[in-house]
Image (spheres, grey):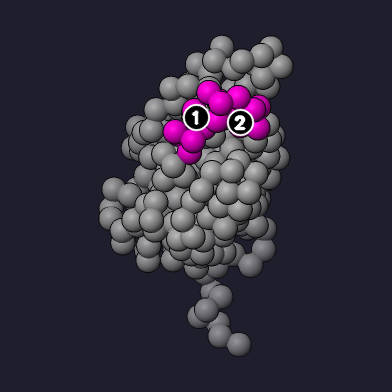
Amino acid sequence: MSEIASIDRPQQTVSAAQFWDQPEEYRDLLLNLINIHVVSELHGADCFERSILRAPTPEMRMRMAKTVMEEYGHHLRYRKLMEELGLDWQEYAQRKGHLTTFDVPIESWADQAVFLALLDRAAGHQFRHFVQCKYEPFARAAQETLKEEYGHIGLGMDAVKELLQTPQGRADVERVCRKWLTAGLQSFGGEQSKKNERYRYWGIKQDTNEGMREAYWQQVRAFITKDWGIDLPQDWREIWQPEVAGDDEEERAY
Ligand SMILES: [Fe+2]
Ligand SMILES: [Fe+2]
């Protein structure tokens, strides 16, 4: 048995009261993730809000409004994690930009539908790792968020299905599909990421960016080609070229 290997990593569930007893790197990585959500869930909710009236039917508007409400709820949920550690979330929020995902503008209902189907799904792939992390408040928040993200993905899939029924809707989905696929692939971060290596060391993630991206691609490629009837290459590198993670990308990805 190696004592060195396990000396600093939490073996058991860590509570908020035990947070400050944890090693600095572990705390920093968790706070980075919590802060990403405080910033990006709020920004995302603001971006989504305009889509409520873009939705074509009252049913879709209601589901979109619920999605927006839940995104503000996610912001508040992660804020609470900071507050229970006695941290000023606004001060932290100033240190960080929102996720690069939100650099791409959502300009139409087709954009919003495909975003939910592909980008909330990409977020879901991250959350499936976070729920296994030993810091209990973050794992619990991730579990609650993941449940709601599945609802958002469902709305996206239903909305795309509806759009695909008309020639205009199909053209709209086809036009925006690659743009959101690019954002989805990119959201997993650079290749050979040092930060990902540290997340894995500390048990916050269980897979490499490359591994997560590949799993995501296999999943989305299957339903886009089969159910949506949109052609895609076998290899995602024909859609987006990764780089070895640079500093800015490391900063603004998960
Ligand atoms: Fe969210
Ligand atoms: Fe969402």
Which residue position is annotated with label 1? 171
Q: Could you tell me the amino acid type at mark 1?
A: Ala
Residue 75 at least partly seen = no
- Single out the residue that lies furthest toward the bottom: 1
Question: Residue 59 location in percent, x, y?
Answer: 71, 16
9 left or right of 90?
A: right
In primary-sequence order, the first of circles 2 and 1 is 2
Is residue 245 magenta-colored?
A: no
Quarter of the figure with the N terminus: bottom right
Q: Is residue 10 above or below residue 69?
A: below
Question: Residue 36 location in percent, x, y?
Answer: 45, 40
Instruction: Choose between 182 and 122: the one closer to the eye.
Output: 182
Q: Which residues are magenta?
A: 159-177
Question: Residue 91 location in percent, x, y?
Answer: 38, 32
Instruction: Choose between 12 and 149: the one closer to the eye.
Output: 149
How many numbered marks appear? 2
Task: Considering the whole magenta stretch, tell me its main secondary structure.
Answer: helix
Identify the disc placed on residue 50.
none
Q: Is mark 1 within 8 Å of ligand 2?
A: no
87 left or right of 148?
A: left
Q: Is mark 2 within 8 Å of ligand 2?
A: no
- Single out the residue that lies furthest toward the front: 167
* Residue drawn at the location 66% of the way across and 14% of the way down: 57
Which residue position is annotated with label 2? 164
Q: Is residue 72 above or below residue 54?
A: below
Q: Could you tell me the amino acid type at mark 2?
A: Leu
Give the crowd class for mark 2: few <14, some 14-19, many >=20 residues within 10 Å.
many
* Residue drawn at the location 56% of the way across and 26% of the way down: 167
205 left or right of 62?
A: left
Q: Quadrant of residue 58?
A: top right
Is residue 162 magenta-colored?
A: yes
